[in-house]
Amino acid sequence: MTPFDAVIDRRDSGCNKWNRYEADVLPMWVADMDFPACAPILDALRARIDHGVLGYGMAQARLRRAIVAHLDRQYGWRVAPEAVIPLPGVVPGFNLALRATCAPGAGVVVQTPVYPPMLKAPDNWGLRRIDAPLAAEGEVEPAAFRAALAAAGQGAFLLCNPHNPTGRVFRREELETMAEAALSAGVAIVSDDIHCDLLFDGRRHIPVASLSPEVGARTITLMSAGKTWNIAGLNAA
Ligand SMILES: Cc1ncc(COP(=O)(O)O)c(C=O)c1O
């Protein structure tokens, strides 16, 4: 028996997924799996609970070092430890990033169809959403994309890479084309990379910020262990 065979009743655990609909509905609307987190994660949490004191915390130097070592190992991406900012989630993260990067009333380019909270985020700040629809198979349509950027003013391109819901893992050339277009339009890049460790067929994730120092300087990247390790409820990004 593997952890995937056990049927775990989550209804009494304050679970959003299983309590949203009637009891006879199988909820498949959210990326939240019904198996326990792996032993090292549970052991670390137990040790923290056993300490007993649950006061304010802050990211210590060794946490930042562990994160940047992981980014280097996984993606060959060198990041300064002080550039890592702990956040309560990727969704709060891209909302804050839009607030930080966009001028009042500017445009936010999204590649539709896309994860619904990304569609709503511009309106949270009175920003204009500009849709740049993806072509068949989730390919970028360069002309439509450039036209969307041109209408964004001092705004942002809200990238989803890998892309939800198309599942596209953008190729390096596609990312380069998008990043060059964003930079030449004077538009910041906010990249939601939450699915970065769930790649198949030997693919390796390419954070858009890792393309060049110039692109990195204009990009805020959002990552989290939530999807990879099925720990979304820990609210850490
Ligand atoms: C593309 C994308 N971004 C963000 C999230 C959620 O991020 P968080 O729970 O860290 O706010 C999801 C969840 O499914 C997602 O698919």
Image (cartoon, rainbow, N blue to C red):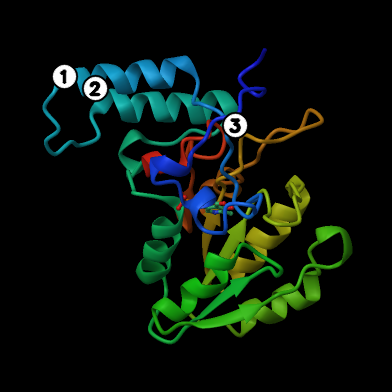
Which is more N-terminal, label 1 or label 3?
A: 1
Query: Which residue is depicted at the point 57% across and 72% down?
Result: 119
Viewer can see residue 220: yes
Q: Nearer the viewer, residue 234 or 198?
A: 234
Q: Nearer the viewer, residue 171 or 23?
A: 23
Q: Position of residue 122 (x, y in %)?
A: 48, 76
In this figure, what is the number of numbered marks? Answer: 3
Residue type, numbered disc 1? His
Q: Which mark is residue 48?
A: 2
Q: Locate the C terminus and report the quarter of the image it occupies.
A: top left
Q: Which mark is residue 51?
A: 1
Which is more N-terminal, label 2 or label 3?
A: 2
Mark in the foreground, 3 or 1:
1
Q: Position of residue 49 (x, y in %)?
A: 22, 23
Q: Position of residue 73 (x, y in %)?
A: 55, 23
Q: Secondary structure at mark 1?
A: helix
Residue type, numbered disc 3? Tyr
Residues marked 1 and 2 touching at CB (< 8 Å): yes
Q: Secondary structure at mark 2?
A: helix
Left or right of residue 131, residue 187 in this image = left
